[in-house]
Image (cartoon, rainbow, N blue to C red):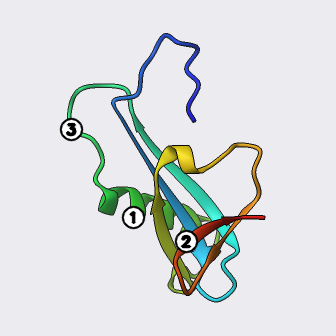
Amino acid sequence: MLNTGGKLKPTAHLVCIVYDAHSGHIAHVHHEISLHKGPHATQAEAEAAALDQLKKRGKDASKFRVLHIKPDELSPLGRYKVDPQRRTLEQL
């Protein structure tokens, strides 16, 4: 979860997991967080931003898939992978 020290409250929080389509290895975890009341990023916009980060690192985005999860499904101390067939997040 996002810790803002109690001063700022997120009005929207999307999480995209970018993972290898074959192995389920997680390549990138992308958060889109809004701290204002205006328009928020859509899931499609968050996904595009997540894949763009991968491309900036020289990765071939066609070999990866994106899983959208709720922010509370991910622990900062946890280790995870994605089951590519079921498209579910698994803790290791």
Q: Secondary structure at mark 1?
A: helix
Give the image location of residue 39, x and y in percent: 21, 38
Whether residues under marks 2 and 3 lie with C-beta atoms below 8 angstroms apart, the answer is no
> Mark 3 sits on what residue?
39
- Mark 2 — residue? 88
- Provide the residue designation for mark 1: 48
For the residues carrying marks 2 and 1, which lies nearer the camera in this image?
2
Q: CA distance from mark 2 to mark 3?
A: 29 Å
Q: Viewed as shown, does residue 28 lie left or right of 13?
A: right
Q: Is residue 56 above or below residue 31?
A: below
Residue 72 lies, in percent from the top left, at 54, 43
Tag 3 secondary structure: loop
Q: Amino acid at mark 3?
A: Pro
Quarter of image, res 75: top right
Q: Is 80 placed above or below 21 here? A: above
* Residue 84 percent location from the top left of the image: 58, 83
Residue appearing at x 61%, y 49% in the figure:
74
Lower sequence index among marks 2 and 1: 1
- The number of discs equals 3
| Residue at 78% from the left image edge and 64% from the top image edge | 92
Structural crowding at the residue carrying mark 3, measured as other residues with C-alpha within 10 Å and reported as few (<14), some (14–19) or many (≥20): few
Spatial CA span between label 3 and label 1: 17 Å
Residue type of the residue flagged with mark 1: Ala
Q: Which amino acid, mark 2?
A: Thr
Marks 1 and 3: in contact by CB < 8 Å? Answer: no
What is the C-alpha distance between the residues marked 2 and 1? 20 Å
Q: Check the image and report above or below for 45 versus 5.
A: below
Q: Earlier in the sequence, mark 2 or mark 3?
A: 3
